[in-house]
Image (cartoon, coloured by chain):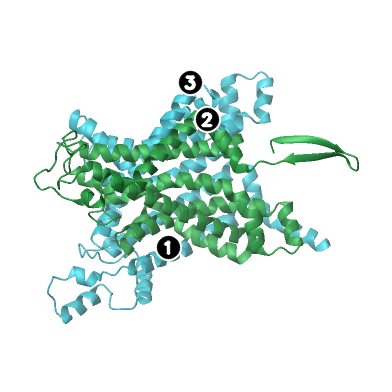
Chain colours: A green, B cyan
Amino acid sequence: MANTTIAKTPQSGVKLKTKRRSPGREVWERLKSSPLAMASLAGVLLFVFIGVFADVFYSYDYAIKQFPLEKLLPPGTPGHLLGTDNFGRDLLARMIHGTRTALVIGIVSSFASVVISAILACLCAMFGGIVDNIIMRIIDVISCIPSLVVALAICAALGNGIPQLIVALLFSSLPMHVKMFRSVALTVSKMEYVESAVALGGKPWYIMVRHLWPNLASIIIVNGTAQISMSIMMGATLGFIGLGVKAPTPEWGTMLSEGLKYMMRNQYMVLIPGIALALAALFVNTFGDCLRDAFDPQLKGKA
Amino acid sequence: MLKYTIKRLIMLPIMLLVVALLIFILLNLSESDPVVLMLPSEYTQEQYDAMAAKFGLDKPMMVQYFNWVKNAVQGNLGLSYKTKGPVTDDVAFRIPISIKLAFYTTIVMIIIGVPLGVMCAVKQYSVFDGIVNVLAKFMGAIPTFWLGLMLILAFSIKLGWFPTYGIETWRHWVLPMITLLLPYLANYIRQVRSAMLDCIRQDYVRTARSKGAKESRVIFRDALKNALLPIITFTGGCFASLIGGAVVVERVFAIPGLGNKIVDSINHRDIPTLLACTMVLAVFSIVVQLVIDLCYAAIDPRVKSTYENSHKIKKLRTKTEGAK
């Protein structure tokens, strides 16, 4: 796309010879030129680093170990850098392992959600008619309940735990993505190259993989990134309400709701998880916005 | 137009039936037996059977579902497992509170959001636009419940300006409304801005300017009037989702609304109450969506004509395809 040279060949006069660079590389080049994108990427990578190497900093057992004599120590206490909570657990260790929980919940549920949505959207666009109707009516039904309430109901039905939480977040975000991907897939499926592929006898699966998915790739990546921060926030919200992960598991939302009772005297217990949560969401959101700009420079500056 | 409205109105109860069925199936997946939870820790088989019969839990799920639908149509949403009283009264008491919160917040959002969005669009890439953009990013990243806690910490505990919970006076509503408003406001301003930007670039705006119309007239008469359509759409969408988003805010500020009841009923496995609250939210969001669509058609003659002429267009299309 970028390096176009015109070479004359004796037979056909002017022939356009294009040296293509992969679209991924081009997006990366654009991302690299934006300082905001690099800064937010660094922030995201920091969180990923903390999440991946959580065990190197503190073992999981330390994060859930209670020190009965060291309850509610303020931040800065020697031995407990961020202090301890009402059960005498080290807050720094819990924050670090909470990062891992948040990342697992956010990334797995968003990834599953966009992949399933993309498949459903492609099915709608490819087969149309009754398939489209059935899928979209089910989506309509789910989307007329607020997404938080969908997640609440699923959590209530399946019980507490990380896998259950992921399923709840997955279903609550599904309608939005399916609707968005479907509209793009429908536009693409009316393109002439898809029509000609159908006319040449291309199987639906082939057209889906060869033509629809590459065209959906950018919107899938951009929406998936935005979804990660939404899932992290909603996961924390569910934890705050008292659903979500099981009790000793370090999770930011649960930590916040535990700190609620001690908010008057020990404000750090609400401040620390909240700031971590807001920072994680801010980095992921900003990076998602930059990613969208990089994929589609025309959209830049729009909402 | 009338035909379209009727079609949508017929779809409404069908949608609700399916929503109820889905929630019914979902809540029956839960392993815990509500009858056991309602009984004292030691009970006899007779007590169990009596309790199950009282709440209609001795019948298979589908029978329960049809019974529920039959009663719900008559305005009886069943008995609460927790309070053992009728759910309808409890829910009816809570609906106005939740709607009030969402409605006032939407009004404030329009009052603040539309002028700011228009200003951002008119002065695109200016310092003001940049500041609003950055603020929007920060606001979008703050979790609602945490924002509520911080506001309580700052304005209730430290400064003592506003009470922390309750709904008695207007002072009680200030903090919940701000909490609910801020995360949505950021996105709202950005949406207004992009709707306005789309219109400002149109030919008719350029024509108006070249005719020598005043800038304020161009912005408000020509651009904003046309941008109103998308603005109405997502204002309605926001209103519907504010009611859902209020779940957390109601929880933080202990407002006795629907959202608070939903969380309570989940914690107590109070399935009839949960079902009733969810259905109210579903009815609400479907009706709001319907009203938005109808408003849309009423305002924009282009949309109206597509509804009115859709059967004609279809006929024409089949005719031309037949001719081919």
Quote the CA–CA distance across marks 3 and 2: 19 Å
To which residue does mark 1 refer? B19
Q: Amino acid at mark 2?
A: Ser
Tell which of B162 and B86 is nearer to you: B162
Q: Are marks 3 and 1 on the same chain?
A: yes
The furthest residue to the left: A69
Q: Position of residue B167 (x, y in %)?
A: 24, 41
Q: Position of residue B277 (x, y in %)?
A: 33, 57
Mark 2 vs mark 1: in front: 2
Local packing at callout 3 (Cα closer than 10 Å; few below 14, some 14-19, many 20+) is: few
Q: Amino acid at mark 3?
A: Val
Secondary element at tag 2: loop
Secondary element at tag 3: helix
Residue at 28% across, 78% down? B58
Q: Chain of mark 1?
A: B
Establish if A200 lies above or below A59. below
To which residue does mark 3 refer? B127
Residue at 38% across, 59% down? B279
Q: Position of residue B245 (x, y in %)?
A: 36, 46
Q: Is residue B89 rendered to the left or right of residue A196?
A: left
Q: Is residue A205 rendered to the left or right of residue B185?
A: right
Mark 3 vs mark 2: in front: 2
Local packing at callout 1 (Cα closer than 10 Å; few below 14, some 14-19, many 20+) is: many
Tell which of B279 and A155 is nearer to you: A155
Q: Are marks 3 and 1 in contact (CB under 8 Å)?
A: no
To which residue does mark 2 refer? A34
Give the mark nearer the N terminus: 3 vs 1.
Answer: 1
Q: Are marks 3 and 2 on the same chain?
A: no
Q: Chain of mark 3?
A: B
